[in-house]
Image (spheres, helix red, strand yellow):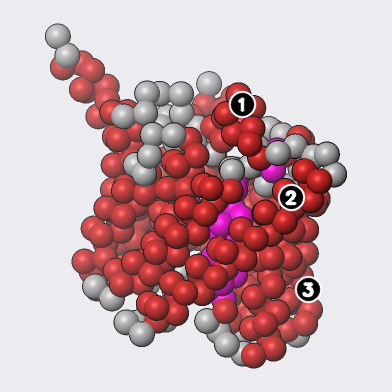
Amino acid sequence: MLGRDVLREAARLEGSNFSLLAGIRGGAFTVAPMALLLATNDLSLVYATLGAMLLTTTEGPNSTPLPLRFLLLACLTEASAFALGTVVALSGLVAIPLVGLGVCAGLLAGDSLAVAQVGRVTAIFFAVGVGLPGASAGAVPARFAFALLGGFLALAGCWLQRSVGRGAGGASSSYWSTGATRRGLRQLWPTNLSFRFHVFRWAVAAGAGSAFGLAVGLLLGLPRDFWIVVTIIVALRPRIGPTVATTLTIVAGTAVGAMLAASITLGTGDLLILGSLLLVFGVLMFASRGVNLGLVQLFFTPFIIILLNIIYPGDWRLAEIRILDVGIGGAIAILSVCSLEVFERRAHARRP
């Protein structure tokens, strides 16, 4: 059964989610702050790119996007979480339990699939805020302001595309209540369990795993330990089969994408070329959003590595570090769900 889950996840292709138009829009509005960064050399603009990228990710599969009101909520929660994560980063080792609490809180954000998706990406941005280099008290306002700016920029792109689509007779985003949208979002929040007690245990397991993952990253001295926590949040599912399948899919996509990114960053340091490739991978990443998780990781990995190489030139180790971090995060996600299932079996056995 486990092998079947792995093969199903690896082979699953939701062709209806592919949208080149959404990819062009997402890539253009996400990379736009980087064009200004290259012109002004203001590194704070990278926070706007991160805000735009995660807001566009929050939108969900291309065929079933979240309504704009939820994306507006995400603009506020994600920028705030990024700033809060920066504050937590200044607390030393106390950051380890605080990361666990923050991730757990994000995954328990609401009892609807839409709010749950906002909470999930908010938890990811919180982890990025904790682990991204350059944390300081002075950086908190800038991180919040630029992340918020990037989120609003991406929101404007969403609104523009949907307005044009409606004007051309396209579908309106008001179909959130339809079964198709709910099924699409369950790919990102995949549980048909009752949302309360079971998901509470699952969120606690994710929080505990995230705290442990950060501790491992700090112990090993990994420079991008937030990738471990992000992988745990993305890979962990309420059951072991889907968790293993998702983890292996992420690791495979990351490995291929990292090798591609390494060949690019080792081959050139020209900012114009790197910026152009950043746009290309951004378009491919958002165009294939919801099609296949491994495919998205294949495009996302060179996107994020090229982005970081623009900020930290010549750091060729980022590719291998990302593979290592994703492998560690995936292993902890599997360990967490195994522990959760053991706990649930014992709790069930105690019942009269």
Of 184 and 73, nearer the camera is: 73
Identified by mark 3, the residue type is Ser
Helix, strand or loop under label 3: helix
State the residue at coordinates (55%, 84%): 43
Q: Residue furthest front?
A: 167
Identified by mark 2, the residue type is Ser
For marks 3 and 2, give the CA distance.
27 Å
Prevailing secondary structure of the magenta residues: helix
According to the picture, the residue beneath numbered tag 3 turns out to be: 276
The answer to whether residue 206 is visible is no
For marks 1 and 3, give the CA distance.
38 Å
Helix, strand or loop under label 1: loop
The answer to whether residue 277 is visible is yes
Identified by mark 1, the residue type is Thr
Where residue 159 sits in the image (x, y, percent)?
A: 67, 54
Q: Residues within 10 Å of mark 3 (few under 14, many from 20)?
A: few
For marks 2 and 1, give the CA distance.
20 Å
**In screen coordinates, is 11 left or right of 48?**
right
Of 191 and 218, nearer the camera is: 191
Helix, strand or loop under label 2: helix
Residue 270: name its quadrant. Answer: bottom right
Image disc number at residue 163 = 2
Mark 2 or mark 1: which is in front? 2
Where residue 13 sits in the image (x, y, percent)?
A: 72, 35
According to the picture, the residue beneath numbered tag 1 turns out to be: 178
> Is residue 329 on the magenta stretch?
no
Q: Which residues are magenta?
A: 46-63
**In screen coordinates, is 11 left or right of 96?**
right
Q: Residue furthest right?
A: 168
